[in-house]
Image (cartoon, rainbow, N blue to C red):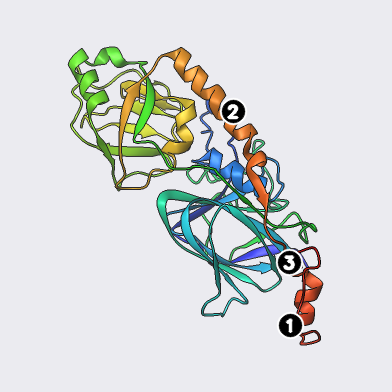
Amino acid sequence: MTAALRILSPGLSTTIQDLGRHRFQRWGVSVGGALDPVAFQAANALVDNPASAGALEAMYCGPSFVVEADDARLAFAGGDAAIEILDNADAASGETIAPMRSVRLRRGQAVRIGSIRNGATLYIAVQGGFAVEPVLGSVATDSRGRIGGWHGRALREGDTLPLARAAASERDECRLDGFDLAPPRRFRVVLGPQSDWFAAAEIERFCAGEYTVSAGSNRMGMRLEGAPIRHRDGFNIVSDAIVTGSVQVPGSGQPIVLLADHQTTGGYPKIATVISADLPALGRLPVGAKMSFTPVTLEQAAAARRALFAVLAGIRDNIVRLSPPPSLVATRLLECNLISGVYDAAA
C-alpha cells in the first residue's frame, strides 16, 4: 500500500511548493515557489528534510487530511493556526497543537487546520517529502501554467498525495524556538528601474505613504491601496523583465508588488524593487495588512541578504527537543488495554 495523505478538505488554496523553478524565465516560465521561503525552510528543518524539499503551502485557511501510512512525521511553520490532531477522520475534536513544531502521526489519524491568523501562509512539511515528479527541476505548483505540484493545481477534496517514506524515523519530536516571523511595517526597496517615470515629489509620496494589502492580491501580485502615485508622462513602457519584488505602478496609480508567481515581462513602469531579504516577510502579509516602503542602497540590500542567509543557516541551531511521548509500541499496547500506563525512566 502506498503511503499517502488523503485530503478531506483542501482549505482555501493549498498547493505543493518548493524553493522555485529557476533558470527558465527566458522561456516565459515563472520561478514560483514558496511565498515565504523562511517559514518553508523552517518546516522542512523540523522534519530533517533538505531545505528545498516539497511541502504544502496553505493560504488563509488550512486543509484537513488523514494519514494513510504506517506513520508519518509532520511539521508546521508560518502564521498562527489551530492545528487539531484527531484520532480518526470522523472525530469531532482532538488535541490542538501550535505551529513551529513536529508531530508523529499513525495510520488513520487526521489533521484539521483552521484559519491562519497573523499571517497569510502556513507550511506543512512531511518527513521525506512527497513522491511527485519534478517538472523542469522543481515540484512547485504553477497553477497558471498547470505544471508541477499535484497535477499542476491546488489540492481538492479526495486527492491522495503519495509520500516518499512509508514510515517516520525513530527520533524525538522537536520545536523551533526564538524564531520571529512577524513582518515589519516598512519594507526596504531599491528605487528603479523606471523611477525616472515619476517626479521627485511622487517618489517621496510613495516612500512616505502607508498602503493596505487589498483583496485583489494573490500569489502573482500584491495589490496595494493608498494615495495614488502619478506618472510623469503616461504609464505604458516597452515590456521588459520582471523580478520578484518589482513594484509596478499601472494607470490607477495604485502599486502592485510582484510575488512568486509573477509574469516574466511587464509593460508598466516599476518605481522600485523590494530587496530580496524582505521578500519572505512580504509573503506573510495578509489582506488588510498595513505596510510602507523605505529606500536603501544596493550595498545595504546586499548586506541584508547576507544577514538573511545567516538566519537560514542557523535555523537548525534553534531546534530543541520536546519531551518524548510514549513509544509507538507502548501507545498501541495502551490502545489494546494490554498495559495500564507508561513511565519515562530517563525523566
Dot 3 falls on a residue whose secondary structure is: loop
Measuring from the top left, give residue 306's x and y in whole percent. 56, 22
Q: Mark 3 — residue?
A: 69
Q: Distance between the Cα atoms at labels 2 and 1?
A: 46 Å
Dot 1 falls on a residue whose secondary structure is: helix
Q: Quadrant of the C terminus?
A: bottom right
**In the figure, is residue 208 to the left or right of 11?**
left
Dot 2 falls on a residue whose secondary structure is: helix
**What number is the disc on residue 309?**
2
Which residue lies at the image location 31% right of the left edge and 38% below the top edge? Answer: 223
Measuring from the top left, give residue 241's x and y in whole percent. 44, 21
- Residue that lies at the very extreme toward the bottom in this rendered image: 337
| Lower position in the chain sequence, tag 2 or tag 1 | 2
Instruction: Give the crowd class for mark 1: few <14, some 14-19, many >=20 residues within 10 Å.
Output: few
Which residue lies at the image location 71% right of the left edge and 57% below the top edge? Answer: 163
**What number is the disc on residue 186?**
none
